[in-house]
Image: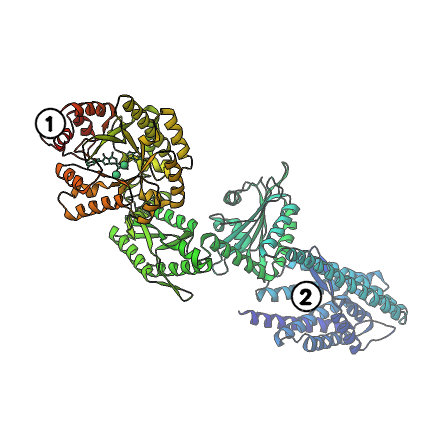
């Protein structure tokens, strides 16, 4: 049966009941003798007045309303026929409910039948029990009370049934209880009125006046109270909202209040997702050592929704208290999920919907836990909290803020790309996928722009930002949906390409990015070109974790920059930071301390007469397991680790000491020491060199410092200033590897140098390659034009020697004379050269190896050539 049909049949039943009761009541005859008789319309007026004058009263946070409808009814018991009473009441209700409340016909019919039944039953019971006694007889009072209680019970039951059939929530017992209390009070009042009317009808005027005054006073009080309590609420929360700009701050206040009120360590709010209903946001306010902690948004605890407590709170809208003594499994389960020892949880409602839950946890102090009284208090507070969220508006705002915060925490605000955190997270997820058996390759790429700093400096930050945004767009456009592009900061971008079939796929993605960035960017009508360098690390080959992959992509990117290639794959062999290199750095430090770093010398001879006029000090590392290691393998490492400084001074000192010994032994020899780029940035260099010269007693003119052009170009102004100071000490300066670097003539002119060394790569080939010979020739001429001495290194054969001499080159250095060898070996060799003479030329073929170099020197290096040259 539908709800409607049920209500209709209930109405019909009530009407039947009313008719039957009325018939019996009428037959019993009504009041016996009465001083006055009130007409039906008198009752109509009376009932109308009580309908209009409904009282609202709040009992234990619940609003109840009641009327004085018993008053005309009780008067009717004594002063009118049952007909008049029932007719008056029905007319009054009909008028009131159609004209004022505009009820639907069904509801109206139901209400009228219910009133009719109620009134008729009351009349029937009264007349049956009272035996026509006057209102002054206590016997009548009992009859009145019984009649009214039964009538009220009937009304409560019928109304409750109707509400429940319509899906409402009616609690019979509380309503019944309130109704009984009201009935007793109202009955007493009504009896008083009836007595007054019975004894002296005019006194009724006085009674009415008192009653009306009381009623008005009460209504005034009630509405004032209502207004006051809602004002109080409003005041409290507007104060909160007013003082705190964000919804989060309101939440913070509410949680703080909850913690204080319930003496709890923690207060938390869980907010549901509007669409899915899943628990999405979690805010936590905690009592830390610094009294109140800030509101901490975090991910909701996992598995919360599957607990029975959650179902109770969110599903059934019931607050739940869990004392720490409670042993129930479902409670323990919940406590474990939220990591608390005890808790109270209550639903948070907005516009009648559950939007989340509020919880306090961990009662402070050692004794006691939360109990049912706390539960009541907390439920009220939860209601207030719901009000504070202004019917959901603030909850929405809070959700939005939390989403925004989450977004901001993971994204770059300028480009909208992922940020480092999100990027690392994604790479981490990829690692987890692999652990679960994902066999695919992935690539982590690191990219930076080649000329971004220039754009920023010359066109301003605004244009720099525009450029970065456009770069971000172009990168994203070349990639797949599943790829992640992140801006790590500045002009540095990182890209994750998951699920690749081959390394080539990563390379072609990188090429596509480079291609996309090659097209000019237009910034405020200006056309700007920026290149990019990309380093790629492949997972799992180059690593599994985000840190390693990023670091290796970084190494590859710097290599790409150095090599001038736009895209470079990571290669462990070239990685300065690979574990092998790091161990080497530690070993190198140790080697310096242990004396495993040694200085070899390679002689330089004057081309005009073959005289040994100097040596170049070249450093070697006698590695305990790897044998002799050449400088190309550890100088870069020393430069990166800061070891270059002690290394340079070790070589300088050892070379000067050796020079002193040679000079003392009668060899008028100059020693040359190589300076690294780093040394040229050391402002103390010249004073330290001076100190070493003084210490060893070597005149400045016997020391040559070899610098490279790239070393000077790193910071020309500072380098030139430093070189000038060095030159002032009498030290000779030589430009090493000339012809390979920038070859900037203008700088060469500005530098206070004395010598250029033609790079050995030209010298090697000059005997066979005419164009190399031309280069060597022009360098020599250039040097001479600038008033510099010219040195050719890498002279390996007799033909080169002759050619160089023909070109007017001043000095030669190379295997033809000798490989670099230890100082004592060189001393012996020089002594031999001065004594011996040989007839054949036999250049040593193993040019680049170091170990043979030591062994072969004793077998006499390029000495024969020298002899024949002379
Ligand atoms: P460099 O200054 O150009 O040194 C000359 C290099 O050419 C030396 O290599 C030397 O052994 C090699 N060489 C000389 N003659 C010939 C030849 O006829 N044929 C061939 N194939 N090679 C020849 P080495 O000793 O391996 O040094 C390499 C580089 O390491 C040096 O290039 C220099 O830049 C750097 N270096 C060496 N010692 C030091 C040092 O104490 N401090 C610094 N900062 N750098 C050093
Ligand atoms: Ca050199
Ligand atoms: Ca050189």
Residue 830: horizontal and vertical position, in percent? 20, 25
Query: Which sits in the foreground, 566 or 456?
Result: 456
413 in relation to 343, above or below: below
| Mark-to-mark CA distance, 1 and 2 | 137 Å
523 in relation to 832, above or below: below
Q: Please tell me whether mark 1 or mark 2 is closer to you in this view.
A: 1
Q: In this view, does 613 lie to the left or right of 348?
A: left
Q: Is residue 520 left or right of residue 33?
A: left
Q: Which colour scheme is used?
A: rainbow
In the displayed image of the protein, which residue is found farthest to the left? 839
**The C terminus lies in quadrant:** top left
Q: Which residue is drawn at the image coordinates 78% and 62% (left, top)?
A: 221
Query: Which sits in the foreground, 314 or 395?
Result: 395
Q: In this view, does 780 lie to the left or right of 718?
A: left
**Neighbour class for label 2 at 10 Å: few (<14), some, many (≥20)?**
many
Picture quadrant where residue 414 is located: bottom left
Residue 292: horizontal and vertical position, in percent? 62, 44
* Count of number-bearing discs: 2
Residue 106: horizontal and vertical position, in percent? 61, 74
Q: In this view, does 509 lie to the left or right of 260?
A: left
What residue is disc 2 on?
155
Secondary structure under badge 1? loop
Secondary structure under badge 2? helix
In the displayed image of the protein, which residue is found farthest to the top? 665
Q: Which residue is drawn at the image coordinates 35% and 53% (left, top)?
A: 450
Picture quadrant where residue 456 is located: bottom left
Picture quadrant where residue 702 is located: top left
The answer to whether residue 276 of the structure is visible from this angle is yes
What residue is disc 1 on?
838
- The quarter of the image that holds ligand 3 is top left
Query: Which sits in the foreground, 212 or 429?
Result: 429
**Residue 704, disc:** none
């Amino acid at each position: 049966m539908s709800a409607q049909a049920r209500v209709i049949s209930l109405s019909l039943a009530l009407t039947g009941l009313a008719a039957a009761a009325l018939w019996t009541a009428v037959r019993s005859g009504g009041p016996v003798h009465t001083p006055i008789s009130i007409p039906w319309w008198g009752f109509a007026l009376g009932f109308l007045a009580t309908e209009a004058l409904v009282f609202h009263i709040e009992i234990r946070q619940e609003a109840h309303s009641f009327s004085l409808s018993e008053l005309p009814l009780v008067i009717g018991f004594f002063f009118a026929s049952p007909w008049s009473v029932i007719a008056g009441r029905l007319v009054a209700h009909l008028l009131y409910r159609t004209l004022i409340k505009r009820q639907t016909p069904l509801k109206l019919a139901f209400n009228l039948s219910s009133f009719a039944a109620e009134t008729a039953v009351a009349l029937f019971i009264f007349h049956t029990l009272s035996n026509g006694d006057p209102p002054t007889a206590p016997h009548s009072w009992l009859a009145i009370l019984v009649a009214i209680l039964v009538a009220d019970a009937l009304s409560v039951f019928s109304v409750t049934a109707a509400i429940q059939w319509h899906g409402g929530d009616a609690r019979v017992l509380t309503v019944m209880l309130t109704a009984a209390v009201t009935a007793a009070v109202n009955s007493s009042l009504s009896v008083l009125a009836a007595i007054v009317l019975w004894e002296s009808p005019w006194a009724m005027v006085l009674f009415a006046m008192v009653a009306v005054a009381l009623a008005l006073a009460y209504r005034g009080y009630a509405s004032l109270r209502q207004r006051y309590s809602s004002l109080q609420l409003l005041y409290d929360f507007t104060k909160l909202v007013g003082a705190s700009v964000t919804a989060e701050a309101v939440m913070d206040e509410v949680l703080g209040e909850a913690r204080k009120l319930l003496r709890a360590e923690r207060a938390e709010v869980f907010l549901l997702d509007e669409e899915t209903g899943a628990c999405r946001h979690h805010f936590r306010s905690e009592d830390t050592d610094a009294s109140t902690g800030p509101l901490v948004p975090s991910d909701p605890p996992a598995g919360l929704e599957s607990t029975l407590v959650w179902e109770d709170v969110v599903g059934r809208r019931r607050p739940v208290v869990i004392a720490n003594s409670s042993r129930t499994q479902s409670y323990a389960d919940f406590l474990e999920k939220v990591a608390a020892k005890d808790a109270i949880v209550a639903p948070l409602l907005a516009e009648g919907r559950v939007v989340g839950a509020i919880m306090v946890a961990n009662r402070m102090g050692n004794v006691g836990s939360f109990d049912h009284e706390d539960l009541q208090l907390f439920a009220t507070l939860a209601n207030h909290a719901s009000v504070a969220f202004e019917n959901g508006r603030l909850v929405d705002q809070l959700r939005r803020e939390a989403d925004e915060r989450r977004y901001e925490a993971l994204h770059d605000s300028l480009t909208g790309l992922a940020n480092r955190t999100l990027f690392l997270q994604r790479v981490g997820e990829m690692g987890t996928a692999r652990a679960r058996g994902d066999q695919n390759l992935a690539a982590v790429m690191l990219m930076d722009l080649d000329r971004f700093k220039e754009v920023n400096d010359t066109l301003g930050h605004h244009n720099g930002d525009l450029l970065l945004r456009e770069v971000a767009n172009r990168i994203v456009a070349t990639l797949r949906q599943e790829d992640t592009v992140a801006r790590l900061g500045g002009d540095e971008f990182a890209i994750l390409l998951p699920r690749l079939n081959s390394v080539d796929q990563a390379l072609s993605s990188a090429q596509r990015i480079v291609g996309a960035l090659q097209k000019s960017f237009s910034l405020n009508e200006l056309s700007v070109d920026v290149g990019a360098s990309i380093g790629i690390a492949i997972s799992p080959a180059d690593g599994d974790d985000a840190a390693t992959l990023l670091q290796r992509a970084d190494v590859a990117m710097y290599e790409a920059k150095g090599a001038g290639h736009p895209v470079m794959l990571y290669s462990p062999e070239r990685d300065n930071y690979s574990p092998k290199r790091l161990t080497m750095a530690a070993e190198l430090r140790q080697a310096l301390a242990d004396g495993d770093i040694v200085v070899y010398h390679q002689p330089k001879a004057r081309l005009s007469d073959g005289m040994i006029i100097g040596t170049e000090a070249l450093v070697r590392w006698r590695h305990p397991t790897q044998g002799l290691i050449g400088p190309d393998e550890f100088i870069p490492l020393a430069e990166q680790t800061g070891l270059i400084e002690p290394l340079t001074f070790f070589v300088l000192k050892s070379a000067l000491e050796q020079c002193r010994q040679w000079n003392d032994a009668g060899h008028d020899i100059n020693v040359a020491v190589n300076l690294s780029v780093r040394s040229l940035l050391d402002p103390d260099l010249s004073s330290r060199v001076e100190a070493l010269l003084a210490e060893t007693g070597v005149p400045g003119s016997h020391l040559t410092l070899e610098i490279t052009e790239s070393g000077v170009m790193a910071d020309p102004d500072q380098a030139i200033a430093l070189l000038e100071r060095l030159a002032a000490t009498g030290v000779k300066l030589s430009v090493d590897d000339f012809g390979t670097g920038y070859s900037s003539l203008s700088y060469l002119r500005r530098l206070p140098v004395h010598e250029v060394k033609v790079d050995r790569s030209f010298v090697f080939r000059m005997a066979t390659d005419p164009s190399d010979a031309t280069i060597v020739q022009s360098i020599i001429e250039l040097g001479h034009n600038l008033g510099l001495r010219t040195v050719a290194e890498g002279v390996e054969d007799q033909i080169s020697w002759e050619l160089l001499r023909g070109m007017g080159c001043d000095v030669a250095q190379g295997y033809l004379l000798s490989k670099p060898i230890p100082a004592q070996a060189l001393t012996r060799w020089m002594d031999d050269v001065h004594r011996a003479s040989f007839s054949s030329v036999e250049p040593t073929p193993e040019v680049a190896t170091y170990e043979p170099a030591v062994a072969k020197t004793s077998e006499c290096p390029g000495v024969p050539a020298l002899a024949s040259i002379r």
